[in-house]
Each structure stands twice: as structure tokens, then as C-alpha cells.
Amino acid sequence: MTSTSKFRIRTLNAISGAGLSRLPDELYEVGGSVDDPHALLVRSAKLHDTPIEDSVLAVARAGAGTNNIPVAELTERGIPVFNTPGANANAVKELVLAGLFIASRNLIPAARFAHELPGDDAEIAQAVEAGKKQFVGFELPGRTLGVIGLGAIGVQVCNAALGLGLNVVGFDPGISVDHAWHLSAEVERASSMEEVFSRADILTVHVPLLEATRGLVSTQRIALMKDSAVLLNFARAEIVDTEAVVSALDAEALGGYVCDFPSTLVHKHPKCISLPHLGASTKEAERNCAIMAADSLRGFLEDGQVHNSVNFPEAVMARQEGTHRLVIVNRNVPNMVGQVSTIVAQHGTNIANLLNKSRGELAVTLVDVESELPPGVLDELCGIDGVLSARAV
Ligand SMILES: NC(=O)C1=CN([C@@H]2O[C@H](COP(=O)(O)OP(=O)(O)OC[C@H]3O[C@@H](n4cnc5c(N)ncnc54)[C@H](O)[C@@H]3O)[C@@H](O)[C@H]2O)C=CC1
Ligand SMILES: O=C(O)C(=O)COP(=O)(O)O
């Protein structure tokens, strides 16, 4: 980028200033009304129905879930989507623990009762004694917490719950080595999802919203749960069949539902508590997510580096003084590197360093050359069948 042409980033949600300050004014124009953006930076803004301009090179989600982003369509267009793994996991874990206590001690109706007590202090004291028995709760030690999804959040919830004296049984057929490493050995790994549903006194879900997880908490699985069990959902509304939950609550076949997603079905139900999607709303998480997302965008826009992408391969190559970098996004088909190197060689320069990484149908090729190439070379590279984009950075 020259001093007159900056990278333009359009923000579609309020992004923590700590992250925005990673995008220096001399290189970046950032804001909600930026035209022809090179990148979009969002939290939960839904992008499915928003046209994404051809100028967009990358999309970053300052957060974990990318179900608000049309990832498949962007992959097809050769546009990377970044998220911020683990950056808000502690914030969500803390709210899940709050959810446990809210449910086990009936805290929301109890606080509402206390708040609405009429009369003077003596009358209030009397009403407290008369009324508090309706809020008798239960203690956590010795009870079983079931955790579906042992990723960044699930692992932290498991480990914290052990500290509260809960027995913890978890299920995740795809747990990563990194997360497994952090999971306490005291967490029992169930052999099936159904086992977790039937054993849990409290069940919490921490999976992404995918076609495979939509409605994961279904009528059939709720039927396996204890009548007194409490369900916690701080993942996504659509992972739970809310109508099935409400039916089970009404039939006294489920004890309670605490979630982070208000809806007409849950927000008036006496056995449901919903919070306004607060899982990641701490100063610390907002900061962590914004910094990671901004850094990923910088890395890709300025150097073609790919770090923390949900659809692109990890591609990180240090830059060497005096070299010029080409960033090529291509379909993962044979002989791409051969064709790219031939074009570069035809322009009489040597390749100083080259990285080619693939993931699924896509690949990223970073080529550092010893002398600057004429602009026309990018058109030649784009002309290779299977190349989706080529730029010099
Ligand atoms: N309420 C809020 O504000 C927040 C909600 N979230 C939600 O929580 C989700 C999880 O977040 P992280 O733990 O950071 O993600 P993560 O990617 O670290 O972990 C997700 C885990 O779910 C597992 N999984 C996927 N499908 C599964 C299945 N069918 N059964 C069992 N396990 C399955 C994966 O193997 C992975 O280990 C996010 O995708 C997002 O939807 C995340 C952050 C904040
Ligand atoms: O990180 C996630 O997946 C979240 O759900 C957080 O959403 P938010 O950034 O608070 O709108």
C-alpha cells in the first residue's frame, strides 16, 4: 500500500479500541461506513444477506462462532474467514458457572421476589421469612455435570466444575490434541452423547452451530434426561430444540433451562432463564478477540499470512529483507506451484522462498522473489486455471 492508498476495513459491530489500535492510521482506514472495503471485521453481525463486495480480501470474526458468516460461499470465492479461538473462553466459562448457580439456587426468581417486596423494613423482613422457602435450591458437590463439546470453552467449564466438587462427564468425538492436553484427567469421557444426556444432573453444550449440531438437544435426547435435570445453553439458540425443551419443562420431565439467547418461547416461561447473549461481553474478552482478529487481518492483508482461519490453511512464512512477496490463493489441484514458478522464472527472477499450504479444496501459495516483478505478472498468475486471486504485498 502507498501512503495515499490505505487498506480499508469496514466494521459491522462495535470492536474494542484495543483491537482497532493495532490498525495504524497511516496504513488503515477503519469504520462502519468505509466504501469498497478490503476486509470486514465483525462480531455477531449476520453477513448471509449482505452482499460482500468484490473488493473484500478477508473477513474476521472477533469471537468464536462463525455461523453468522457465509463461510462456504467465501471459501468458494477464495476469501479467508478468521476467528479468535479461545479468546473469549474464560468469559463464557464464568457465565456458565453463573448459570449453574442461577439454576441451583433459583437466583433470578429469588432476586425478583426480593426486589418487589412491599412495605417497611419490618414488613420486608417478615415477608422474607415467609417467602424464602419457595427458593430452596440444591448444592453441586457429588452431582454430575455433562459437557457436550470439549473445545476451548468446554474444557475450561469441565476443569472449573471439578473444582466445585461436581463429577464431570464429557463427550466430543473430535476433541483436538491441544484441548485434550488441557482437560483434567478427572473428567470422564463418555462413549456416546446419549450417555451424557442420561447421566447429567446439569448438562451444558459447547459445540459450534453446524448442520450436524442444529437441534442436537432434541426431543429424543431430552427424553433421556433426568426429570430434575437442568440444561444450560451458552452455545447457540439453534443447537437446542426450544419447543421440545418447553414441552419437557411443562410436563415436569426437565427441571430448568438457562440460556444466553432470549426468544418468545423462553423469556416468559417460569422455568427458563435467558440472558441477552452476554457470554463474551467482558472487557477482557472483547479486548482479546479484537486484538486477535485485527492481527489476523493485518497478517493477511500486509503479508498474505494465514493464522486462525476457519476455512484457509495455516500459512505463515517470515519475510526476508529485500524480497518481494506474491500471495496466490488457488484451488488445491496438481501442478499449481509448477505453473506459478514457471511464470516467475519467465520474468527472470529467482524465488528466494516459497510456501504452499492446502486445506480441503483450497491452497495458499506465498512466493518471495528476489526482484520486483512487472504488474502484468499478476494478470498472468490470475490466468492460471484454478487461481482465485494473486496480489503483490
Ligand atoms: N454465548 C456466547 O457469547 C458465546 C458462544 N460461543 C459458542 O460456543 C461455541 C464453542 O466455542 P469454543 O469452545 O470456543 O469452540 P471450539 O471450536 O474450541 O470447540 C468446539 C468443540 O465442539 C466439538 N464438536 C463439534 N461438533 C460436535 C458434536 N456433534 N458433538 C460433540 N462435540 C462436537 C469440536 O470437536 C470442538 O472440540 C462457538 O462455536 C459459539 O457458537 C462462543 C463464545 C461466546
Ligand atoms: O464468540 C462467539 O461465538 C459469540 O457468540 C460472542 O458473540 P459477541 O461477539 O458477543 O456478539
Image (cartoon, helix red, strand yellow):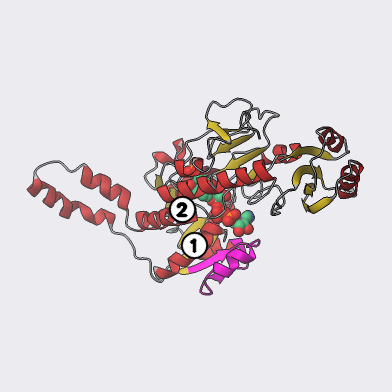
Three-letter code, disc 1: Gln
Is residue 204 at all visible to an observer of this figure? yes
Residue sticking out furthest to the bottom: 185
Q: Give x and y (percent) for residue 174.
A: 65, 61
**Does residue 228 sit above or below 283 in this rendering?**
below
Three-letter code, disc 2: Val
Residue annotated with mark 2: 92
Where is the N terminus found, in terms of image quarters?
top right
Depth check: give the residue in front, 149 or 325. Answer: 325
Looking at the rendering, which quadrant does residue 86 occupy? bottom right
Q: Give x and y (percent) for residue 303.
A: 68, 45
Could you tell me if the residues under marks 1 and 2 are in contact, i.e. CB atoms within 8 Å?
yes
Q: Give x and y (percent) for residue 329.
A: 77, 43
Looking at the rendering, which quadrant does residue 189 occupy? bottom right
Q: Which residue is drawn at 57% across and 42% down?
A: 61
Q: What stretch is highlighted in magenta?
A: 168-193
